[in-house]
Image: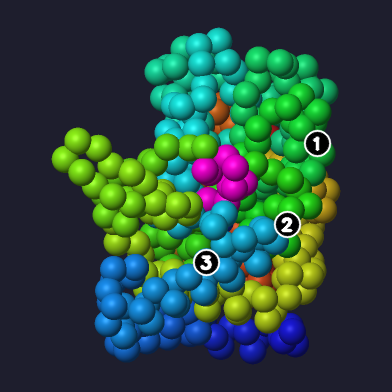
Amino acid sequence: MLKFDVSKIREDFPILGRKIRGKNLVYFDNASTSQKPKAVLEALQRYYAETNANVHRGIHALSQQATDQCEAVRAQTARFLHASGPEQIVFTRNATEAINLVAYAWGRKFLKAGDEILLTGMEHHSNIVPWQILAQEKGSQLKFAPILEDGCLDLEGLKTLLTPRTKLFAFTAMNNAFGTINPVAELLGLAREQGVLTLVDAAQWTPHLRTDVAAWDCDFLVFSAHKMLGPTGLGVLYGKKKLLESMDPFLGGGDMIREVHLSHSTYNEIPYKFEAGTPHIGGIVAFGAALEYLSRLGWEAIDRHERGLTRYAMDALSQEKELRIYGPSQPERRGGILSFNLEGVHAHDVGTILDTEGVAVRAGHHCCQPLMRRFKTSGTVRASFYFYNTVDEVDVMLRAIRKVKEFFKVKVP
C-alpha cells in the first residue's frame, strides 16, 4: 500500500495541472467520470503501440498476447469483486449496457405478465428505463420504494413492496445525485427472504468502497470503468454462474458463437456468450492498470480521505444560509457527493459562474428526474469528490459560490 500523500498522488494526474479560464482546475465532477493517472494512460498507449491485435481469433503472437492481457484483467476484476471465478465477469460498454443485458437476456426469457420488478425512487435513468421497456413488453409491473425527506430509502415502505410476485429487486448501492449510501447487505437480505433475484447498480460504489459480491450474495452487479480511473466505453456485469448460463445471448455476431449453420447457431460458453464482436481491448488492458492503482492506494485510505473531505465541505457549505444541501445530513450515510441549490438562482447559472473560477461541477437533474420531482426541483448543483481532491479545492469552490451570491444579490428570505 502506498503512503496516502494527496500532493504526491496529484502528480500522477496530468489534467489536474491544467488551467481553466486562467484558473487552476478544480475538478468536482467525479460522479460523472474520474480523471486518469499516468499509469492508465501509459497502459492504453502501450497496448496500441506494442500489442494491438484482435482477441480470441488469431494464432499469431500479437493476438495471443492481447488475449492473455484481456483475460488477465478479467481474472483481476473477479478478484476485485471477490467473485468465485472470471467466467462470472462480462465486459460491456458501460453499466447502462450491463443493466440492459440483464433486462434483455434474463427478463425477456423469465419474466411473465403479472410479475413485479421492484426499484427505488432514487435510481439513475439507466436503472429505470430498461425495466420500463421490459415491463411494457411483458405485461409486468414496476414498483418503486419510497424516499424519505433526508434522501434515504423508506425501509418500512420497501418491505411492504416485496411480495411473492416480485421477481427482481434492482437498486443503487450509492445514489449518484445525492450520494446516499444504501444499506446494501440489508436490502439484499430482505430480497433473499422472499426468494427475489437482485441487481446492484454499483457504478458510484465501486470507485470508493470495497466491493464483495460473495459476502453480499447478490445475483447481478454492474459498474463502469470510467468512474474509477479507467477508460470510457467499458463496463462490467457480474452474475452468478447458474444465472448467466441460463440466459440467452444479448447480441449476436462474432465470438459469441460455438458453431454457425445456415439454419441455426450454437453459442459460446460464459462469459463469451454475451460478448459479441470486438471488445474494447485497449480499454480492458488500461482498466487493469486502474485496478492496480486503486489497490495500491488501499480502499480504507481512499474512504478515510473522502469522508474527511466530504465532512469538511458539508460543514463549510452549511454556513451558507441561502444554500440547501440535499441528501443525508450525516456524512457517514453519504458518499463524496454534495448536491445543493442556491436560493433563487438556477443550478445552471451557479455551474456557469463556478466554471469561470475553474471549478468543474455538474448542474442539472443528473439522470434522476423522478428523484428531482420528489424534492420539487428541476435540478441541483452537484460537487463530487475523489481521492485526489483537497480541502483547498473545497475552499476555492466556496469562494466561487460567494461570488455567485454577490452577482445575483442572494439574501436569506
Looking at the image, tell me whether mark 3 or mark 1 is earlier in sequence order.
Answer: 3
**Total count of labels:** 3
Q: What distance separates the C-alpha of mark 1 from that of mark 2? A: 15 Å
User: What residue occupies the far left of the structure in this picture?
Assistant: 262
Residues rendered magenta in the picture: 237-245
- Above/below status of 71 relative to 267: below
Q: Is residue 239 magenta?
A: yes
Q: For the residues carrying marks 3 and 1, which lies nearer the camera in this image?
A: 3
Please state the horizontal and vertical placement of residue 15, each as a whole percent of the image: 45, 79
Identify residue for label 1.
189
**What residue is drawn where x is 65% and y is 36%?**
198
**Identity, as a three-letter code, of the amino acid under mark 2:** Asp
Identify residue for label 2.
212
* Mark sitting on residue 311: none
Looking at the image, tell me whether mark 3 or mark 2 is earlier in sequence order.
Answer: 3
Nearer to me, 407 or 188: 188
Q: Could you tell me which secondary element the residue under label 1 belongs to?
A: helix
**Identity, as a three-letter code, of the amino acid under mark 3:** Arg
Nearer to me, 98 or 298: 98
Q: Are marks 1 and 2 in contact (CB under 8 Å)?
A: no
Identify residue for label 3.
74
